[in-house]
Amino acid sequence: MNRFVKRVPAFLLVATGVACEAGGQKEVSPDVQAAALEVGGSASRALMGTLVAQLTGAMQHGGPVNAVDFCSTSAIGLTSGVARQQGLDLKRTSMKVRNPANAPDEDETAALRYFESALAETGELPGPWVQRAGRDEYRYYQPLTIAPPCLSCHGASGEIDPAVQAILDERYPGDLATDYAVGDFRGVIRVSIPAERLEER
């Protein structure tokens, strides 16, 4: 996979960058972009702060086996909890999903392809992107990359601990989320924001 220098590690998210627009997408005004970056960035940081803290604890108490168990049983629930706290809809998605529940919809696929195309063309991953999704919704996308701790569960398929691989094989028979290297583009956090929340600011 392509690499880049200025990355946002999936394990230690820092929401930086500016909103962009991909070809074929509806125009987003500068004022709405700025508001979406603020709202979406805050929500994505809250989600990653929660997930990183919980995942770190799982790793410390039981290693990669405990971490993959945590991800399979708790990550979606924690995402829903943060979403309720923020009053928004949040999701982690990728072109290479592990859990089918995280598979991208049409708009999310367009966003993922935007990041992939930009990375392929420039060698660098762009910052967050704001997308108009229908009349009543904007979507903020925060790109994520693979950090060293992620390789315990997302690294080369032949190098993952057999105990971890056994859990993945049992719970995710259609798993696509392996064979990554440090720095690879992993996917995005998607934050859905009601249009009225941004346009009235």
Image (cartoon, grey):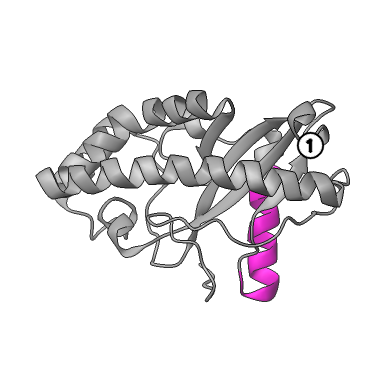
Q: Quadrant of residue 21?
A: bottom right
Q: Position of residue 191 (x, y in %)?
A: 61, 37
Neighbours of disc 1 within 10 Å: few (<14), some (14-19), many (20+): few
- Identify the residue under disc 1: 201
Q: Is 39 placed above or below 144 here?
A: above
Question: Where is residue 96 drawn, in percent x and y?
Answer: 49, 46
Q: How many tags in the picture?
A: 1
Q: Which residue is outermost to the left?
A: 61
Viewer-proximal residue, 140 or 94?
140
Q: Residue 114 lies in magenta, yes or no?
A: yes
Q: Is residue 162 left or right of residue 194?
A: left
- The answer to whether one can see residue 72 in this image is yes
Q: Is residue 97 visible?
A: no
What residue type is disc 1 on? Answer: Arg
Magenta residues (range) = 110-124
- Residue at x 82%, y 32% (from the top left corner): 200
For the residue labelled by badge 1, is the local secondary structure a helix, a strand or a loop?
loop
Residue at figure coordinates x 39%, y 66% from the top left: 181
Q: Is residue 93 left or right of residue 119?
A: left
- Quarter of the image for the C terminus: give it: top right
Prevailing secondary structure class for the magenta stretch in the rendered image? helix
Could you say which is closer to the camera, residue 129 or residue 99?
129
In the rendered view, does 160 fall on the left or right side of 131? left
Which quarter of the figure has residue 58? top left
Q: Is residue 195 above or below residue 108?
A: above
Residue at figure coordinates x 67%, y 49% from the top left: 37
In x, y percent, where is residue 77?
Answer: 38, 25
